[in-house]
Image (cartoon, rainbow, N blue to C red):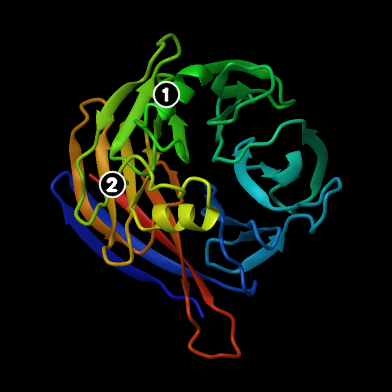
Amino acid sequence: MLQLILIILFAAGGKIEHTSIELTGLPQINPSTILIDDKQNCWVSDYSEHIVAKFAADGKYLFQLGRDGHGPGEIFKPYAMVLLDEDQTILVSSNQGQTQYFGTKTGAYLKQRLPISFMFQAFALEHDKIFLPFSPLPGKKTVHHIINRKGEVLDGWFSKAWLEAYVMKKESTGSFQTAFMHDDHTVYFADPYHPVVLYLKKKEKEPRKWELRIPKGFREVPAPLPPGAGFDPIKHDKWYNSFSKLFIYPLGKNYLAASWLNSEFAPNILQIYNIKTKELVVNNVETINYIRYANENKLYCTEIRDSGNIDDYDRLFLHTYTFIQ
């Protein structure tokens, strides 16, 4: 059953309109990443189940890309996705270097693959170019790259050596997860465990720091880690999962959205900043989950709800937060 709610949240620099809809027709999918195209179709990947599925704007399941496997047109542990060709093509990067093109109308495999893979959200640029954040490539001394449709590297940002030194100085946990390129070719990225955004232009050697306003409920991870936590996967995950996480996204040409995933004892928080002035224009808006995707003035996250019936699958909802000035 579809569900649609509308909530208006007022803020000093504008208002946030919140709507949600249920994604139906495909049982038991746990989103790893999502994309929303210009027609409001929702693309959902499930890393564990090797699924990339398309849902219509009304929430109904349409089709699934490829099938589980390692061969051409098959998908294994999808990392990330990007829409190209005015949403006519979707590029899916999977584990073990499988990066493939599919058509968005029917899901047909387009028999084109890239020799590289990427783990983070990529961005389509003009003239068939793709921005890959935090994608170290063989033989390259940079970590952000622009590639063409064939996977050839056209340009690179941000010294790998500087990043390694920055992490070793304990100024960062080194677990970067979200980044984007602004229209003026400035790259913005954030360490999820500190309220700081780093940004730099192409010719700059070192990034500048932009300290965000700490929201309510935020718990910054202290440094260094407890003895042994960095080498024990269970202790490592337990330690980091007890702290807040920061995710950043572009919101049109003028704004940056900061989404804070807090601990179970505090709500998830959305903030919106003016990129040029660094002014905080929307603060402390509570969201159902942390933001997974942004497109123009809209931000999206997913929610899994218990069906309430032991024999039924959990229910999946897509939440949209629209920034209105």
What's the residue type where badge 2 is placed?
Glu
Q: Vertically, is 226 above or below 286?
A: above
Quickly name the residue at label 2: 220
In the rendering, at what x and y percent does residue 200 appear?
38, 19
Q: Vertically, is 164 above or below 319?
A: above
In the rendering, at what x and y percent does residue 147 appear?
64, 23
What's the residue type where badge 1 is placed?
Asp
Q: Residue placed at 47% from the left, 56% from the top?
A: 235
Q: Can residue 306 be seen in this snapshot?
A: yes
In the rendering, at what x and y percent does residue 287 appear?
32, 60
Q: Residue placed at 59% from the left, 81% from the top?
A: 313
Q: Quadrant of residue 239?
A: bottom left
Element type where label 2 sits in the image:
loop
Q: Quadrant of residue 32?
A: bottom right
Relative placement, left or right, of 29 versus 183 is right
Quarter in which the C terminus is drawn: top left
Q: Quadrant of residue 191?
A: top left
Label 2 crowding class (10 Å Cα cut-off): few <14, some 14-19, many 20+? some
Q: Nearer the viewer, mark 1 or mark 2?
A: 2
Label 1 crowding class (10 Å Cα cut-off): few <14, some 14-19, many 20+? few
Q: Can residue 127 be seen in this snapshot?
A: no
**Residues under labels 1 and 2: Cα distance?**
30 Å
Q: Residue placed at 57% from the left, 65% from the top?
A: 30
Q: Vertically, is 62 above or below 131?
A: below
Q: Residue placed at 70% from the left, 46% from the top?
A: 94
Quickly name the residue at label 1: 183
Of 139 and 253, nearer the camera is 139
Of 269 and 88, nearer the camera is 269
Question: Looking at this rendering, what residue extends furthest in the top direction?
Answer: 203
